Amino acid sequence: MSKFFFPILLLTVFSCRRKDVERKRHEKLIDFKNYTVMNVDELVSADTAYIRNIYSQDFNNKTDTVEYRGNYIYISYLSMVNGCSEYDGDLEFKADSIILKLDNTSGIECTESRCDRLVYKIRNPENKKYKIKKF
């Protein structure tokens, strides 16, 4: 019995380990932060127009910012995310556009939602104006 138990135990232990994969961000992404602004209970009682703005692919001048300062671009906007996940940002450049990306680093998903403020700091040494697209 023990000759079957130990191999199964070892197989279970090693297969259930969390695999830490080193992520590589785009080299121009200097910093990324996200902060929870509203949890699911606050979202239920929020104004419909406000929620529509958060779900929009367009930047809202009341809640979102895109600033070109010196050799950097600062982008801050509200977005709906999975309530159980942890995130890290990334970028993709296509012609004259920057596509903001959001990667689920925890691998956990659930049915709960929350509203987070996503903040990107991007190196822009050529002081180029880009079209910015939310993830």
Image: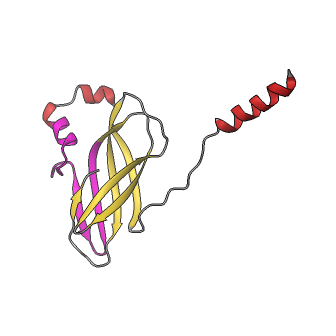
Please give left or right for residue 40 compared with residue 31 in the image: left
Q: Residue at x 69, y 32 (%)?
A: 12
26, 62: nearer the viewer: 26
Q: Is 130 drawn above or below residue 4 in the view shown?
A: below
Q: Where's residue 66, x and y in %?
A: 23, 60
In this picture the colour scheme is: secondary structure
Please give left or right for residue 43 compared with residue 49 in the image: right
Q: Residue at x 86, y 27 (%)?
A: 3
Q: Where's residue 95, x and y in %?
A: 24, 69
| Segment tinted magenta in the rendering | 50-79
Q: Quadrant of residue 55?
A: top left
Q: Quadrant of residue 27?
A: bottom left
Q: Residue furthest top?
A: 1
Name the image quarter holding the N terminus. Answer: top right
Q: Residue at x 81, y 29 (%)?
A: 6
Q: Is 85 drawn above or below residue 100 in the view shown?
A: above
Q: Residue at x 34, y 66 (%)?
A: 122
Q: Residue furthest right?
A: 2
Q: How many marks?
A: 0
Decide whether residue 88 is among the magenta residues. Answer: no
Q: Where's residue 18, x and y in %?
A: 61, 41
16, 135: nearer the viewer: 16
